[in-house]
Image: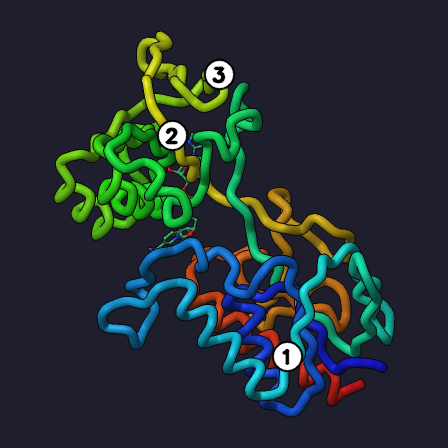
Amino acid sequence: MIYDVVIVGGGPSGLSAAIYSSRARLKTLLIEKNGCGGQMTVTDLLENYPGFNDGINGVDLAVKLEYQAINFGTEIVYDEVTEIKSGKVKEVVTTNSTYKAKAVIIAAGTRVKEMDIPGEAKFKGKGVSSCATCDAPFYKGKKVLVIGGGDSAIQEAIYLAKFAKEVTILHRRNELRATKILQERMLLYPNISVMHNTVPKEIVGKEHIEEVIVTDLRTNKDKSLKVDGAFVFIGLVPNTLFPTGVNLDEQGYIITDENMRTSVDGIFACGDIRQKYLRQVVTATSDGAQAAVSAGRYIDNL
Ligand code: NAP
């Protein structure tokens, strides 16, 4: 059986592509590794996605998008893609099967970047986390460190501040990168403080994290911060983990044109995995719509 379109990844861009593709009556399969929704499922409240005056929980939006795609006829399988083979008929190889398609849309998103410091791997799940929404309740009345100065770090620090006694944000520069509205909101929480010009050097503990050694970049001196948890939000890396044959930029993001076409005929990419300026749910859903329409035109012209 040959699908018209196989979509790799069930985040907002992949689900939006699925809605547009199946509504155009293209036989559409979406392959997702874990559960649909991607990064937004670890977001407590999306308040900049248009149309929801009081914001919307990330999981709730993911479920709505998934149902919308299924209602228009998208098939969803849960499996891990290991390779995409190009040709007139493309093959999407997974751990358990191989799916054939006329067009493929890669929407595999990003994952949180690791710090690559001693102790990080050892204490993952034992005090080191990248999901405040998942783990904040474990830190009721405790001290936590948030590493990073972007939107994720500040948004998650605000969430953590509702549980933890003290939240210290560790940022490598003297100015935060996060949107001003998040910075303003952070000031409303007296238990959040920011330590500027400082980077983590090592995570230390026995069974569980006990302290983080940090370096003050102005003095080059190290000091120890006694904490119960460290939440890492130092940016994202693209999930271009499997061979696809498409051109990538120097950071590994897929290069596309504005119609989401990659360097390989009939393979499209959308959402956070592609080289772009603004990574937001709203730009991901927009990309997905465009990718599906481009895939439809490509199939029409075959
Ligand atoms: P980001 O915007 O890339 O910010 C990463 C932060 O980590 C920066 O402050 C960066 O410092 C710091 N950093 C990077 N490498 C580091 C290292 N090795 N050691 C210490 N600090 C390091 O990443 P993000 O916050 O995860 O956001 C990713 C994307 O999702 C962005 O486009 C963001 O706007 C979007 N997002 C949006 C929302 C929202 O709209 N509410 C929420 C979450 C995420 P520098 O500032 O010095 O570079």
Front one among 211 and 18: 211
Distance Cα–Cα, label 3 vs label 2: 13 Å
Nearer the camera: disc 1 or disc 2? 2
Distance Cα–Cα, label 1 vs label 3: 53 Å
- Check residue 152 in the rendering and tell me which mark sits there, or answer none: none
Query: Badge 3, how many Cα within 10 Å: few under 14, some, many 20+?
Result: few
Q: Who's the residue at 40% across and 19% down the image? A: 210
Of callouts 1 and 3, which one flags the residue occurring earlier in the amino acid sequence?
3
Q: Circle 3 sits on which residue?
A: 206
Q: Which image quarter holds the N terminus?
A: bottom right
Nearer the camera: disc 3 or disc 2? 3
- Check residue 229 in the rendering and tell me which mark sits there, or answer none: 2
The relative height of residue 301 versus residue 255 in the rendered view (above or below) is below
| Tag 1 secondary structure | helix
Dot 2 amino acid type: Gly
Query: Badge 2, how many Cα within 10 Å: few under 14, some, many 20+?
Result: many
Dot 1 amino acid type: Ser
Ligand 1 sits in which quadrant?
A: top left
Of callouts 3 and 2, which one flags the residue occurring earlier in the amino acid sequence?
3
Front one among 230 and 175: 230
The picture quadrant where one finds residue 289 is bottom right
Q: Does the residue labelled 1 lie within 8 Å of ligand 1?
A: no
Residue located farthest toward the bottom when viewing the structure as drawn: 25
Q: How many marks?
A: 3
Q: Who's the residue at 61% across and 69% down the image? A: 260
Q: Tell me residue 8's x, y (percent).
A: 67, 65
Q: Circle 1 sits on which residue?
A: 294
Q: Tell me residue 47's x, y (percent).
A: 29, 63
83 relative position to 176: left or right: right
Contact (CB < 8 A) between labels 1 and 2? no
Dot 3 amino acid type: Lys
Query: Badge 1, how many Cα within 10 Å: few under 14, some, many 20+?
Result: many
